[in-house]
Image: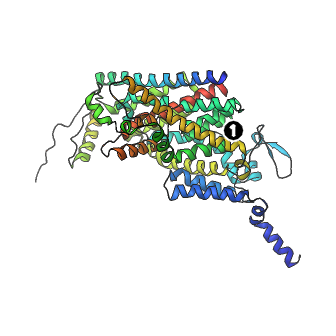
Amino acid sequence: MGSIGDIFQRLYDMTAISSIIADPSFLLMYLIAFGLLYLGVVKHYEPLLLVPIAFGVLIANFPGGEMGVIQADSAGMVPLADGTMESIWDMPLHKIAHEFGIMNYLYYALIKSGLLPPIIFMGVGALTDFGPMLRNLKLAIFGAAAQFGIFAVLLVSLAIGFTPQEAASLGIIGGADGPTAIFTTIKLAPHLLGPIAIAAYSYMALVPVIIPLVVKALCSEKELKINMKEQDKLYPQNMEIKNMRAVKIIFPIAVTTIVALLVPTAVPLIGMLMFGNLIKEIGADTSRLFQTASNGLMNTATIFLGLCVGATMTSDAFLNFKTLGIVAGGFCAFALSIASGILMVKVWNLFAKKKINPLVGATGLSAVPMASRVCNGISTKYDPKNHVLNYCMASNIAGVIGSAVAAGVLISFLG
Amino acid sequence: MFGVQLMLIGMVTVFAILLIVIYGSRLLVHVINKFVPAEVVTAKGKGDDVPMNVLQQAVSQITGGKGHIVKVTKVSK
């Protein structure tokens, strides 16, 4: 039996406080977690994503809690409790749970295995209506233009010393699609998954801040007042869809087939996206599958994805120059994607009679449907009658396909 | 150089796939307009839209998409 002093010392050592005082960098992580929680809870920026991510960050940074995801080196080696090193890829899941805690079990079973991104894509597909895109097919091309940011940042990242795989994983943040960014990084640079996932989801959550910034820098008031409905009246479309239901059912089957034939590496994402959409469009016959994909399964996947992604953001993994470089590079990729969509609309307007509001180009990145909602808010600010939501959704949905195809190309060439 | 090549290949592929999707969808719409009966759209703004849709779905289901509701009359007791 020790003295009272010994007992208090052991009690003090038992708490997280002693470790936090020894390494105050944890405090910075708490600030980041509180900041993200503030954005999610008070500002309502993507709360379904930001709240689990932020809480994951918070619980991952309490020393002794064993809720932080351990960082394997580029060879996949991790330190065990007895001081030896072992490859994480050779460890069974129950050993990962025993050695590193339940969060690592979830992370390696659900995220590193690549399971959750396609499941989330299925849910996204089930929640997506391709109707606006099918009614405004021409606008879908801006979903391609907005992928430029991915490749531009890839080039810059290569120039400053990232490996091609790391540069591609960094660039894919510009697709503004969390599951796509995670899926690509798992395939190409799994050691960067934490910071890339954090950057991708944080910027997606900050779409209401980033899009207005880029739009303000690149667009004039006159351009933002272009009324798409008036343009439609002046130059009506020559294509009428007599049976939208039939088109919507065949569309996901056709797109999956085309993409699978040309870029098979994109099938895990596009295939699941289109499957989710198909079970929605079939209607009553598959309504139970649709309900599961769009509610229970999607919400479960989002909870685990958010918590696990947040848990990768431990102080030792996050607070280094490489991670901060990824966060900065991710922002550039994001902003460049928005800018390239806008610039393509501007070039289009130089030659076309039927003018297009540049906000349609700004939504060429994924982030469905938030990007469209934000752009609709911008347009109605300049002209309360100018609703561009449906037109923005066309390029926005095409952006989901575009970013998944871009990811497929990167995985094909670098994987 | 490798990065530039990758950028070209990537952007060309993304544009090509979306162009195929756009023109493939146009073709799909033309084929469906030609060979599949047009959807029956009920009048908007009436209070009975939902029951009408349910009835139309039921008739479509039973008749394999061939039958349409032309008129619904309220029968008073």
- The one nearer the camera, A57 or B43, is A57
For the C terminus of chain A, the image quarter is top right
Instruction: Give the quadrant of residue A375.
Output: top left
Q: From the top left corner, tell me how far across and down residue A240 is, in percent.
A: 28, 27
Task: From the viewer's perspective, tell me whether residue A165 is left or right of residue A278.
Answer: right
Query: Relative to residue A205, is residue A405 depicted above or below?
Result: above
Query: Relative to residue A198, is residue A243 depicted above or below?
Result: above
Task: From the viewer's perspective, tell me whether residue A2 is left or right of residue A115.
Answer: right
Look at the image and tell me whether residue A180 can be seen.
no
Residue ID for mark 1? A190
Helix, strand or loop for disc 1: helix
Q: Residue furthest left?
A: B77
Q: From the top left corner, tell me how far across and down residue A391 is, in percent.
A: 37, 36
- The one nearer the camera, A352 or A202, is A352
Task: From the viewer's perspective, tell me whether residue A88 is left or right of residue A308.
Answer: right
| Amino acid at pointer 1 | Pro
Q: From the top left corner, tell me how far across and down residue A315 is, in percent.
A: 71, 52
For the N terminus of chain A, the image quarter is bottom right
Q: Residues within 10 Å of mark 1 (few under 14, many from 20)?
A: many
